[in-house]
Image: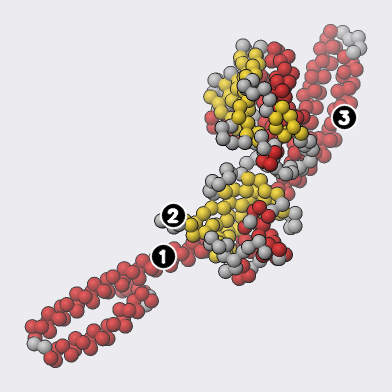
Amino acid sequence: MKRFFKKLLLYAKLPEMRLFWFFLPFLVVLLIINIFYLPDFWIFVILGIFLVLGAIILVNNLRLARSNLEIKIERNELKSIIFNLRDGVIAYDPNFMILIFNRAAEQIFNLKADEIIGRCFNLEMARESRFKFVSQVIFTSLAPVVVRQSEPGVYPQIVDISLDEPKTELRVTTDKIIDPKGQLLGFVKLIHDRSREIALLRSKTEFIAVASHQLRTPLSGLHWALESLMSQKLEAEQKDLVNAALEASVKLLKTVNDLLDISKIEEGKFGYQFENINIINLIETIAAGVKDSAKQFNVKIYFERPSEPSIVISADPQKLSMAISNLLDNAIKYNVPNGEVVLTVERVKDEPYIQISVKDTGVGIPTNEIDKLFTKFFRAENITKIFPEGSGLGLYIAKNIIKRHGGEIWAESEINRGATFYFTLPTDPKLIPPKEIIYGEE
């Protein structure tokens, strides 16, 4: 009972109850006048009517007060959550007037909420030095480097932004704010500062680069010495030992070279040289180059040429050959005896892209491991049991090469039925990123 009266007292103090308390004295005065001038019967009738009306008004006001109180509590809780988020939050209406600017956003942009909330942003404000940074996030087209992580026109929009002044790496997620009727109320941006993550990635990459450089020189010397030994007159047993050592040095050198390639990729210094190439001719050349390797594994290579004699795209032929060769090597190595590898090239319908696929009849990849395929050093569990050797770097390198060309790469597989790797490449050079980006392992 005490709790009930405490709640009643709380609701009675709310602004929504002011109307009830305002009219209550007039009702009391009117009732007193009626008592003196009306017969007893009508006094009881009017008293009953007043009590019923008063009860209805009181109950409705209490309900309204309770609803408004709950809304205010929820709103305050939401404000508290948004204000204390680790990621920056900016919300603005269709006229780009800033409505929300939380604490994390203040730290990212070095601006106070009071300085920016209520301001309508436009391209003129982007020229002011103190608002230039935040303007490049609100109008992402102003940022020097933007890499889309989502399809254009599909919300939420996800982009990675790289800024030089200040040196910052941001992931910006933009979504619409829409009312129940579908009317646009504004936009909200969630800003994740990836600068520290990227800096850590770069420091690890630098370490790999230094270690790999230090390893490659003595390994090259060892490899040269073993090759020289192979040319000498040796007994059969000695020749077998030297040959085994030579094969081991080749594998080790390949791993070191892959690590060096990764360090260059992640530093944005892999050195791409784009030119117009006929992708059909390039794939035909690559397929011909792996036929000897396919024979050793008793695998047949097929290239299904498209009806078009030529599809010209802008690409780096050396780097693209590396990516396709990695896919073909895996398709051959992890195949079954008398297996097949089929290469196809086709245009993506109604889009400025071509799609290339590498399909094999091999051991396949477990469904729960497909998402990890393009991460560094990852090898599927069933593969490691059959082929213990391997660095797990080839697909990571291939992914970065394809993404640098403005494409996407993915895989589909069924265990013991083979796997198909797909990747796209743009036919429009404008869709190629303007410079090398660290793509990481998303």
- Tell me the distance, in whole angstroms, between the alpha carbons under discs 1 and 3: 71 Å
Helix, strand, or loop for circle 2? loop
- Placement of 72 over or under 255, stated as above or below: below
**Is tag 1's residue or tag 3's residue first in the polypeptide sequence?**
1
Quadrant of the image containing the N terminus: bottom left
The three-letter code of the residue at mark 3 reads: Pro
The three-letter code of the residue at mark 2 reads: Gly
Q: Residues within 10 Å of mark 2 (few under 14, many from 20)?
A: few
Q: Residues within 10 Å of mark 3 (few under 14, many from 20)?
A: few
Q: Are marks 1 and 3 in contact (CB under 8 Å)?
A: no
Locate residue 296: give its quadrant. Answer: top right
Write the residue at 80% across / 23% down: 250
Which residue carries the number 2 mark? Answer: 182
Which residue carries the number 1 mark? Answer: 71
Camera-side residue: 278 or 361?
A: 278
**Is tag 3's residue or tag 2's residue first in the polypeptide sequence?**
2
Q: Is residue 392 visible?
A: no
- Placement of 281 over or under 274, stated as above or below: above
Which residue carries the number 3 mark? Answer: 218
Locate residue 17: give its quadrant. Answer: bottom left
Write the residue at 35% across / 71% down: 65
Q: Picture coordinates of residue 114 (x, y %)?
A: 61, 71
In the rendered image, the residue lying farthest to the bottom is 36
Quadrant of the image containing the C terminus: top right
Q: Picture coordinates of residue 173 (x, y %)?
A: 58, 51
- Tell me the distance, in whole angstroms, between the alpha carbons under discs 1 and 2: 22 Å
Q: Picture coordinates of residue 12 (x, y %)?
A: 34, 76
Q: Residues within 10 Å of mark 1 (few under 14, many from 20)?
A: few
**Is tag 1's residue or tag 2's residue first in the polypeptide sequence?**
1
Q: Nearer the viewer, mark 3 or mark 2?
A: 2
Q: Which color scheme did the rendering employ for the protein?
A: secondary structure
